[in-house]
Image (tube, rainbow, N blue to C red):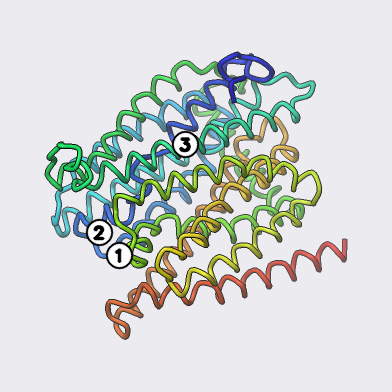
Amino acid sequence: MLSVFSRSGPFAHRNARLYVFFTVLYNARAYYPVLAIFFTDLGLTLERFVFLNLVWALAIFLLEVPSGALADTIGRKKLLVFAAAVMVVEMTILLTAPKDGGTLLFAFCIVNRLLSGTSEAAASGADEAIAYESLPEEGREKAWDEVMATAMRWRSAGFLIAMALGGLLYDPSWLAKLGVIVPVEVAHRLPVAVVLLQALVCVAIALRLEETPHPAGRLGERCVAAFHLTMRTARRAFTTRSIAVVILGGLLIDSVARNFATINSQYYRLIGIPEWAFGFIGAAVGVTSFFVPGIAKRLNERFSPLGVLGIAAVAGVVALGLLAPAWPWFGLLPAMLLMTLLGLVGFTVSRHLHASAESTQRATLLSVKGLAFNLGYGTFSLGFSVLLARLRETQGDDAFRAALQWQMPAFALLILVFFAWAWRGRAMA
């Protein structure tokens, strides 16, 4: 990890160093451990909050691949500066959203989710591509493994700090024990204020990146080229079986794990965890995730990408099965297992796609992956939202607990169908 500061190995190159700092500050957000209860405490129902995840995914659907193609044609740096600037705006909206504002509050939240998806789409692919392309071609794959593993460890450390800080800031009773009296409404916005500061630093970092080569020409010509590049890359991604299998397998696991990650604070309330501890739980996940890159690297060296995804899928089924009973405190263990799968899947899919990508299509291919993952996540969130609404009619306040019990069998069925298709195609190849 210290090689980033010593500027040794691949981190002798500025973009590789700045990529690590950018990805940490952009992704390790202090409101994550309280995300669901932040929105529900503002006055939204849980169903509306889960529906907002679909809105976020729709923004990704519309912009993910075009933004990646634009990154490959008009410049990765421009897209990252734009992503960081939009992040500033989305945090400002959350800070000013009216509590219990009814339709106005919901409108604020929708705009926030649309901007969040826009920012995520702009950054996705462009951040990795600008770092990857700055590395010397000789030994680039090995150097990128080191950069990616280091970035994941730094993100884990960033999450450790952000999660602990976010949970503590959100709970005014904990602040009162330190002699700091903060109104509840103000305390609930403090984690968002911290992320706003991070967004401002992200803008400064993005401005210092060195642009990588991209085609010359007029803006209109490059936008047309971006469209054609999008179509070619998407076609290649889903007609090349080795790429399609990894993307589809990854999105199935990622969707269920990421949906839980967005509602985990509601789950912690269900199993009786005090709010001040939410951040420490997130920090514990960060500590656990610190070891994921090393494990992921060894697994990928020993098994095929499909084999690693199979291991992750089995772990996901086990975790969902143990979440369903909602055991007080013990329920934390499967929750932590499920969320660490995000890192394992992300490492595996990214490693395979970088090895398969052509230089001129790298950001676009990564954006195709991002599009697929976020569309899968949005679809799962929509299904979960509809399930919650239906169960609310029959189960009342126990709807959330009942919805958890549906996740494992549904996920297990999807995984069985996917691997039957994947292994059948492999045997026929």
- Say left or right for 413 vs 245: left
- Which residue was labeled with disc 2? 40
Q: Residues within 10 Å of mark 3 (few under 14, many from 20)?
A: many
Residue drawn where x is 74% and y is 51% of the image: 305
Q: Which mark is residue 122?
A: 3
Which mark is in front, 2 or 3?
2
Q: Residues within 10 Å of mark 1 (few under 14, many from 20)?
A: many
Q: Secondary structure at mark 2?
A: helix
- Which residue was labeled with disc 1? 46
CA separation, marks 1 and 2? Answer: 6 Å
Identity, as a three-letter code, of the amino acid under mark 3: Ala
Rendering coords of residue 408 (x, y %)? 54, 73
Identity, as a three-letter code, of the amino acid under mark 1: Leu
Q: Secondary structure at mark 3?
A: helix
CA separation, marks 2 and 3? Answer: 28 Å
- Say left or right for 303 vs 207: right
Rendering coords of residue 135 (x, y %)? 68, 21
Q: Name the residue nearer the viewer: 110 or 65.
A: 110
Q: Secondary structure at mark 1?
A: helix
Give the number of marks. Answer: 3
Rendering coords of residue 14 (x, y %)? 57, 15
